Image (cartoon, rainbow, N blue to C red):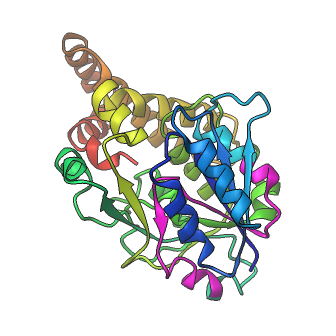
């Protein structure tokens, strides 16, 4: 296997060295692509040092050297990648030694277009643990059992009950079907949950297989300045950011003729449920009353997702 590991880098001067080191341990990794996204800290200088010290580490910036977000940074990395396989890693996360154990075997089957595994949690400080333990705990982010590839798309859409989740840090895909079958990669205008939206579409277009699900193959690094946790929990209501995500999914499926009516209805319900959840209290109950009258299934789904929305944060 020839794997390209893509790492978007923003405000991660404390962590990017360990991320790169964790990827360099694998002989299959032929290159680590750092896409520096105009960090306000010293991440660029550290990335330059890493690229100077190791030929496998390659450093890029956006053509205008501006800040464009994680999605466009990953897109640039994919564009530059030369490996037959693409893997992703956030700059404050890291791989474990078993990261590609399942890939070595499963990718011998040419029908396997992508493999996903389980993500663990590492708290960089006691303060971070105090802040975010309620959200992440010590739980694995994983799919709960081995599913057929045809079930991954409805499972990611929360149509199969307790399907679980997988992280982009634990995903490895064949470059060729990724470029041929995906009509677009990461959505440039999404600053939150762009990876979740990408995984929804990826699981629709590609056959994704389970790898190691019962133990971590990579670790989510949790600290006080995590992008998702800080933005989602302090500045933006999680329901608001999720409503934007499901609005994007709603727009996507309208252009896909092969998606079943059942899936389309479910996507519409999920979008409605987070629209309700982000509404002001006085408006929220009016919306609930409306949907109780015209669409009981939608509101039942909506109430479920209001009550358990924190478990859906990626």
Residue 236 is left or right of residue 73, and the answer is: left
Residue 244 is left or right of residue 78, and the answer is: left
Q: Which residue is drawn at 34% across and 35% down?
A: 230
Tell me, yes or no, if residue 151 can be seen here. yes
> Residue 189: where, in percent of width, then height?
62, 28
Residue 5 is left or right of residue 295, and the answer is: right
Residue 173 lies in quadrant: bottom right
Q: Which residue lies furthest to the top in this view?
A: 282
Tell me, yes or no, if residue 273 can be seen here. no
Q: What stretch is highlighted in magenta?
A: 77-104
> Residue 11: where, in percent of width, then height?
50, 40
For the N terminus, the quadrant is: bottom right
Relative to 263, say whether 139 is above or below: below
Q: Residue at x 19, y 53 (%)?
A: 126
Residue 237 lies in quadrant: top left
Q: Nearer the viewer, residue 175 or 222?
A: 222
Q: Nearer the viewer, residue 290 or 19?
A: 19
Residue 309 lies in quadrant: top left
Q: Does the magenta stretch include residue 124?
A: no
Residue 111 is left or right of residue 237, and the answer is: right
> Residue 256: where, in percent of width, then height?
69, 41
Relative to 164, say whether 146 is above or below: below
Q: Which residue is drawn at 59% across and 58% down?
A: 203
């Amino acid at each position: 296997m020839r794997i390209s590991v893509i790492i978007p880098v923003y405000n991660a001067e404390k962590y990017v060295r360990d991320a790169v080191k964790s990827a360099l341990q694998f002989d299959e990794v032929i290159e680590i692509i750092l896409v520096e996204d105009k960090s306000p800290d010293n991440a660029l200088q550290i990335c330059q040092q890493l690229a100077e010290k190791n030929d496998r580490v390659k450093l890029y910036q956006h053509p205008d050297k501006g800040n464009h977000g994680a999605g466009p940074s990953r897109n640039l990395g994919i564009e530059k990648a030369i490996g037959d396989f693409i893997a992703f890693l956030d700059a404050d996360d890291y791989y474990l030694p078993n990261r590609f154990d399942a890939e070595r075997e499963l990718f011998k089957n040419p029908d396997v277009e992508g493999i996903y595994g389980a993500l663990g949690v590492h708290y960089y400080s006691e303060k971070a643990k105090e802040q975010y333990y309620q959200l992440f705990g010590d739980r694995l982010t994983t799919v709960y059992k081995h599913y057929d590839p045809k079930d991954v798309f409805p499972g990611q859409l929360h149509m199969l009950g307790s399907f679980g989740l997988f992280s982009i840090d634990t995903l490895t895909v064949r470059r060729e079907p990724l470029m041929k079958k995906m009509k677009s990669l990461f959505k440039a205008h999404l600053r939150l949950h762009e990876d979740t939206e990408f995984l929804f579409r990826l699981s629709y277009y590609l056959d994704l297989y389970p790898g190691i699900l019962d133990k971590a193959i990579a670790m989510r690094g949790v600290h006080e300045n995590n992008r998702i946790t800080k933005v989602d929990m302090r500045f933006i209501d999680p329901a608001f950011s999720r409503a934007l995500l499901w609005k994007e999914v709603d727009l996507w499926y309208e252009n896909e003729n092969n998606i079943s009516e059942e899936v389309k209805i479910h996507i519409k319900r999920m979008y409605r449920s987070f629209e309700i959840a982000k509404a002001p209290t006085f408006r929220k109950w009016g919306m609930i009353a409306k949907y109780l009258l015209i669409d009981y299934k939608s509101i039942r789904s909506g109430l479920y997702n209001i009550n358990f929305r924190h478990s859906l944060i990626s």
